Image (spheres, rainbow, N blue to C red):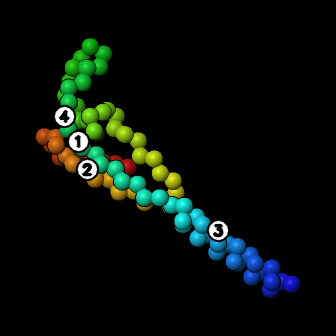
Amino acid sequence: MGICRLGFLVGFLWFMAMDCMAQSNTHHYNFVLQQAQFTRLCETKTMLTVNGSFPGPTIHARRGDTIYVNVHNEGEYGVTIHW
């Protein structure tokens, strides 16, 4: 009986691992960085926006997902993005 239960447990764990891998998704994001005029608190200034908004979009993902982010910088200066 012990070997049968062990075999069932190993099989069940393998099935659950495969099921989790099958549920992972791939997400693609395209970020265009560009300068735009923004007015906040009666003051207008030029800021770097992501897809025309500030702050930029939120990346939604779950553990195990694969994320691809393409960043196209149309601003004047080089930038770094910290995740």
Q: CA distance from mark 3 to mark 4?
A: 47 Å
Task: Give the camera-side residue of 47 and 74.
Answer: 74
Residue type, mark 2 in image: Val
Q: Which residue occupies 36% across, 54% down?
A: 28
Query: Distance from label 4 to label 2 (Cα)?
Result: 14 Å
Q: Going by the image, does 65 lie left or right of 37?
A: right
Q: Nearer the viewer, mark 3 or mark 4?
A: 3
Q: Amino acid at mark 4?
A: Gln
Quarter holding residue 5: bottom right
For the residue pair 81 and 49, the one nearer the viewer reads as 49
Return the disc, 1 or 3, that comes first in the chain's sequence.
Answer: 3
Percent across and percent down for residue 48 are: 23, 35
Please tell me the numbered disc located at residue 35: 4
Which residue is the site of mark 3? 16
Tell me the distance, in whole angstroms, between the alpha carbons under discs 1 and 2: 7 Å
Dot 1 amino acid type: Leu
Q: Picture coordinates of residue 43 (x, y %)?
A: 24, 17
Mark 2 touching mark 3, by CB under 8 A? no
Residue density around tag 4, few if under 14, some if 14–19, many if 20 or more, within 10 Å: some
Which label sits in the foreground, 1 or 3? 3
Q: Residues within 10 Å of mark 2 (few under 14, many from 20)?
A: few
What residue does disc 2 label? 71
